Image (cartoon, rainbow, N blue to C red):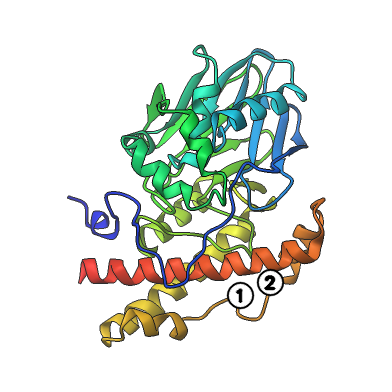
């Protein structure tokens, strides 16, 4: 058994910090706005962050969609949005993570569409009831939409560390650099656009991240591998929130995780209980949103003031999740 396995859990933890609330991923009010990032390369951006973003990449022969949404109805909506920007036949669907808000819509895709993701993602798609339970906490009144489906469409093809798909003059690369938000985070990279869809693994600098199955140690190693493995990366389309600068996002998350690991492990070794550790750890969002990130939010069609307030509250909550998970992993490996 790998030493890193001690830094991971078998499934997403149900534990949450006191008075925690999660991001609103409900499909209510969800619309997509296409943003061209290169020839045949479009981000499908949710107009209300932090609802899920998607994407479509097209070559001369075929197209590929990134992530399928939180319900089959959203999966159909993603396909319509993709069709508006490309007439190429849809042949592939890539899942960046196994989480239901990225995969429950798989069932809405035609049978001749090949679904592909990492082996670890597919291995975690084995308990639909549990995943519905976990994602229902983000539905904010729309939980009944989960009653409409009882099947979780699994990927048809899996890869371990790397795969490539030729769409006809446009190549899409799929990478797994290591666990982060979950065990199988998949990066979908389009070299011609120097753009990567990063799912829950990497958000724009200034946004918070969420660790649900593991601690900072493997995450840090994976981010370093990402930085080395995609040296020409310029732009990231995260699963949630605004588009960002790739290298800047990697460096910001590395700095955050390294400090988090140091502060939490030091407190744990000193015997400080978890309830006190939250206050002891540096919260990058204690004083508000980073101005550059706030400016990215201002570009959304929704009014900027509520978006700032809502996103700031979410970042503070996700930071507490990361503190909690790091502490629990310290307990596990000690």
The residue drawn where x is 64% and y is 57% is: 204
Q: Pick the residue in front: 126 or 20.
A: 20
Query: SS at mark 1?
Result: loop
Q: Position of residue 165 (x, y in %)?
A: 53, 23
Examine the rendering and report whether any part of residue 95 can be seen. no
The residue drawn where x is 71% and y is 42% is: 45
Q: Which mark is residue 289?
A: 2
Q: Position of residue 110 (x, y in %)?
A: 54, 15
Quadrant showing the C terminus:
bottom left
Q: Which mark is residue 285?
A: 1
Query: Does 140 appear above or below 131?
Result: below
Query: SS at mark 2?
Result: loop
Side (left or right) of 256 relative to 324: right
Task: Quadrant for residue 268, please give it.
Answer: bottom left
Q: Pick the residue in front: 29 or 283.
A: 29
Q: Position of residue 284 (x, y in %)?
A: 58, 76
Q: Residues within 10 Å of mark 2 (few under 14, many from 20)?
A: many
Q: Pick the residue in front: 101 or 325.
A: 101
Tell me the distance, in whole angstroms, between the alpha carbons under discs 1 and 2: 6 Å
Q: Can you name the residue that lies furthest to the left here?
A: 1
The residue drawn where x is 70% and y is 68% is: 309
Q: Are marks 1 and 2 in contact (CB under 8 Å)?
A: yes
The residue drawn where x is 44% and y is 53% is: 181
Q: How many marks?
A: 2
Query: Does 284 appear above or below 65?
Result: below
């Amino acid at each position: 058994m790998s030493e890193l396995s001690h830094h991971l859990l078998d499934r997403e933890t149900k534990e949450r910090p006191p008075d925690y609330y999660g991001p609103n991923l409900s499909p209510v009010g969800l619309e997509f706005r296409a943003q061209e990032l290169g020839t045949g390369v479009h981000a499908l951006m949710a107009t209300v962050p932090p609802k899920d973003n998607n994407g479509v990449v097209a070559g001369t022969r075929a197209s590929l969609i990134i992530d399928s949404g939180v319900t089959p109805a959203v999966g159909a909506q993603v396909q319509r949005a993709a069709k508006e920007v490309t007439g190429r036949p849809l042949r592939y669907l890539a899942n960046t993570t196994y989480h239901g808000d990225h995969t429950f819509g798989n069932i809405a895709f035609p049978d001749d569409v090949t679904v592909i993701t990492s082996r670890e993602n597919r291995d975690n798609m084995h308990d639909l009831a549990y995943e519905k339970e976990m994602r229902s906490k983000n539905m904010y009144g729309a939980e009944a939409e989960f009653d409409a489906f009882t099947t979780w469409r699994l990927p048809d093809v899996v890869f371990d560390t790397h795969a490539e798909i030729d769409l006809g003059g446009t190549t899409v690369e799929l990478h797994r650099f290591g666990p982060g938000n979950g065990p199988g985070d998949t990066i979908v990279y389009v070299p011609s656009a120097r753009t990567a869809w990063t799912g829950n693994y990497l958000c724009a600098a200034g946004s918070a991240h969420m660790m649900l199955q593991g601690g900072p140690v493997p995450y840090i190693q994976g981010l370093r591998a990402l930085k080395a493995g995609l040296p020409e990366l310029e732009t990231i389309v995260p699963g949630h929130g605004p588009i960002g600068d790739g290298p800047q996002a990697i460096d910001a998350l590395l700095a955050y995780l390294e400090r988090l690991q140091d502060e939490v492990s030091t407190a744990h070794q000193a015997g400080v209980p978890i309830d006190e550790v939250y206050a002891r750890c540096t919260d990058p969002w204690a004083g508000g949103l980073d101005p550059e990130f706030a400016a990215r939010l201002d570009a959304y069609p929704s009014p900027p003031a509520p978006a700032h307030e809502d996103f700031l509250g979410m970042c503070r909550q996700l930071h507490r999740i990361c503190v909690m998970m790091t502490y629990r992993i310290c307990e596990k490996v000690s």
